[in-house]
Image (cartoon, rainbow, N blue to C red):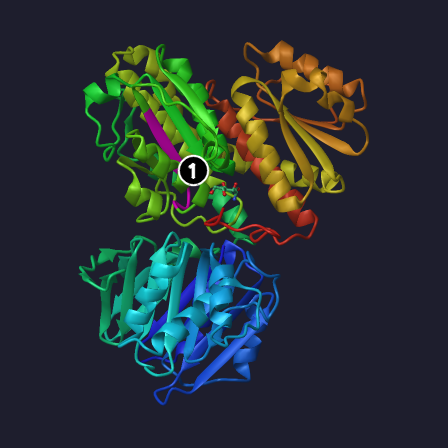
């Protein structure tokens, strides 16, 4: 997704803006730009297609001592990725950067053209810039012009802008695309993501939808869209510099895979207690009676978040006997006609807390009066602020576009919610003890896999990096893991990979198997062992190049067998998933891909 940065204060702005954009690179983008303004309203606008490094090389030859400016990394939605469409946009007196989509920009463009506006780019953002410039001609202030423009706009936006008529103020506004302001002594920092503020200040203000901020060297004044003053709530930023640096790893993805034991401990900390066999989630805002009345759980998310919900849903239905769980892909649910039975709780799973499709489902479910709980990582994010209650997974900044530590902790958090429902329903602690014990052991079990198997997996990855197709198969609680494993691989390696229920092979997918494919099979030594083993035999007889991930010592006929020793039984799929993560990572590295910022992807999909 696009990234926004801004600064107004006493320091040299260009380096602050470039450093902020570098912090936002992980979100995915295809062009970048900054504009600064000096006290005499002289501006320096620099834009570049490609990486922030390209932009930085332009700064080197266009240095200024300006102390105010805005910057942007663009992930193309309207108009192809090139310099002409890069932000900041400049029309008349106005310079502007924008995240989001202006749905009615064509109508606005036609109206502005009648007032002699012409357009250099294909973007909706330039139209918004022109609209503000047009209204500013008759407005008493830039705030008034921005307010008037935003009332005419249909769509999502996060914007930062200034006018050359007043180089001492930057105006920001949000509706659907996050904006955070960092406040310090005589300076204000603006960003679309908290990671750009780390190291500058830990005092932040999260803008809410419909708010406009006027930022000056004295601070920020918030208004609603009718320019009525709104109180700004200063909060403490929980991120720190260490959490957004690679700390010696080659990529954030590998760092975050290795971070899982600790990030999972952080998710579980203070919430499960195997000694007392208890689970306690603060922040649900649900009484025991309300938990007891739960009969249906909807778990909603996109991508990895969706798979995490599906995975946890299997566990919840294992340890409850009157709760039905259904997992929903947010981008499907938001447009589908669906019914919500009585006694339903909706779990909204999202690492970023800003995913547009997931947020849209939350808003629809709230409209229907459904109790909505967030399972979110980004503190203060839109979803986190709009739910009725919820659980922060507390895994720290997840920088790599491919989600890993958040997945594991999302499964744990949703499972803990299910355990609380089960306890409230009187399910015996004996029946729940295994899940609580295994959750408690899980960080150590993941640590063991990372220590014992990473080298072996790296070697195997080199052998399979040459393939362009893969099939991931698993049964029961290994089916969501097969889906997630395939997503990890395709995201970072660009290998076409499908996750499939192993029992489905004979219903079509087995026709695919030939030398173009390799297969990953999850084979746990449990009640489905023989059934899954027969699937592997089916594939092998058709020339499969199968990698089997298993916890058994039994002889297995496959091209590669990765044996994982684990004390777990029920949560074994979450340990096998770490193998898939490492396999995807090392294959992507072997293929020379941009592992942390895969092509076409964004860390947080804040547009439809
Ligand atoms: C996962 O590796 C992907 N980056 C993607 O599927 C992601 O999980 C999805 O976009 C949902 O993001 P969220 O958790 O921030 O809502």
Q: Is residue 272 above or below residue 469?
A: above
Q: Looking at mark 1, is its residue's CB closer than 8 Å to ligand 1? A: no
Image quarter for residue 464? top right
Residue in the picture at 46% in, 19% down:
570
Q: Foreground residue, 405 or 341?
A: 341
Q: Is residue 352 above or below residue 232?
A: above
Q: How many marks?
A: 1
Residue 200 can be seen, yes or no: no
Residue in the picture at 47% in, 26% down:
310
What main secondary structure does the magenta stretch of the protein show?
Answer: strand
Q: Is residue 203 left or right of residue 340?
A: left
* Residue 133: % across, % down: 40, 75
Specify whether residue 172 is painted magenta: no
Which residue is outermost to the bottom?
40
Q: Disc 1 on helix, strand or loop?
A: helix
Q: Foreground residue, 151 or 443?
A: 151
Residue in the picture at 41% in, 85% down:
65
Q: Is residue 389 left or right of residue 346?
A: left
Residue in the picture at 52% in, 25% down:
573
Q: Which residue is mark 1?
A: 261
* Residue 85: % across, % down: 57, 67
Q: Which residues are magenta?
A: 345-353
């Amino acid at each position: 997704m696009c990234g926004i940065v801004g600064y107004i204060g006493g320091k040299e702005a260009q380096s602050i803006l470039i450093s902020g954009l570098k912090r936002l690179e992980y979100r995915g983008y295809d062009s970048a730009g900054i504009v600064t303004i000096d006290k005499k309203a002289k501006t320096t606008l620099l834009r570049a297609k490609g990486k922030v490094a390209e932009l930085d090389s332009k700064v080197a030859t266009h240095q200024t001592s300006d102390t105010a400016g805005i910057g942007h990394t663009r992930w193309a939605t309207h108009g192809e990725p090139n310099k002409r469409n890069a932000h900041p946009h400049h029309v008349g007196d106005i310079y502007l950067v924008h995240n989001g989509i202006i749905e009615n920009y064509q109508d606005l463009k036609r109206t502005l053209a009648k007032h002699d506006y012409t357009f250099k780019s294909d973007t909706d953002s330039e139209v918004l810039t022109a609209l503000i410039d047009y209204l500013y001609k008759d407005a008493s202030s830039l705030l008034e012009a921005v307010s008037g423009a935003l009332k005419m706009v249909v769509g999502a936006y996060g914007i930062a802008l200034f006018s050359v008529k007043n180089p001492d103020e930057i105006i920001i506004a949000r509706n659907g695309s996050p904006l955070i302001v960092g406040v310090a002594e005589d300076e204000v920092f603006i960003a679309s993501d908290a990671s750009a503020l780390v190291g500058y200040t830990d005092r932040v203000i999260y803008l809410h939808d419909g708010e406009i901020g006027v930022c000056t060297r004295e601070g920020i004044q918030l208004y609603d869209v009718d320019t009525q003053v709104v109180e700004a709530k200063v909060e403490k930023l929980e991120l720190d510099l260490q959490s957004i640096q690679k700390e010696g790893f080659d990529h954030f993805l590998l760092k975050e895979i290795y971070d899982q034991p600790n990030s999972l401990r952080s998710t579980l900390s203070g919430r499960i207690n195997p000694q007392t066999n208890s689970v306690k989630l603060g922040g649900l805002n649900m009484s025991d009676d309300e938990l007891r009345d739960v009969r249906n759980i909807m778990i909603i998310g996109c991508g990895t978040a969706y798979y995490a919900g599906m995975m946890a849903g299997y566990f919840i239905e294992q340890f409850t006997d009157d709760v039905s769980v259904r997992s929903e892909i947010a981008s499907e649910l938001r447009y589908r006609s669906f019914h919500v039975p009585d006694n339903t709780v909706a779990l909204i799973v999202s690492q970023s807390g800003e995913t547009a499709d997931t947020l849209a489902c939350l808003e629809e479910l709230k409209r229907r009066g459904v109790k909505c709980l967030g399972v979110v990582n980004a503190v203060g994010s839109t979803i986190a602020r709009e739910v009725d209650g919820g659980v922060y997974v507390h895994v720290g900044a997840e920088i790599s576009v491919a989600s890993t530590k958040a997945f594991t902790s999302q499964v744990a958090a949703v499972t803990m919610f299910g355990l609380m429902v089960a306890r409230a329903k009187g399910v015996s602690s004996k029946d729940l003890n295994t899940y609580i014990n295994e959750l408690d052991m899980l960080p150590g079990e993941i640590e063991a896999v990372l220590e014992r198997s990473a080298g072996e997996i790296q070697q195997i990855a080199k052998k399979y990096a040459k393939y362009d197709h893969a099939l991931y198969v698993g049964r029961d609680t290994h089916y969501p893991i097969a889906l997630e494993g395939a997503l990890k691989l395709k995201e970072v390696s660009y290998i076409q990979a499908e996750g499939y229920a192993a029992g489905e092979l004979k219903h079509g997918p087995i026709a695919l198997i030939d030398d173009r494919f390799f297969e990953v099979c999850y084979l746990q030594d449990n009640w489905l062992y023989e059934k899954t083993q027969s699937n592997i035999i089916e594939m092998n007889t058709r020339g499969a190049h199968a990698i089997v991930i298993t916890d058994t010592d039994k002889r297995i006929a496959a091209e590669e067998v990765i044996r994982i020793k684990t004390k777990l039984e029920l949560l074994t799929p979450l340990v096998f998933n770490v193998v898939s993560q490492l396999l995807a990572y090392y294959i992507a590295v072997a293929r020379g891909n941009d592992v942390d910022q895969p092509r076409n992807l964004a860390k947080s999909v804040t547009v439809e």
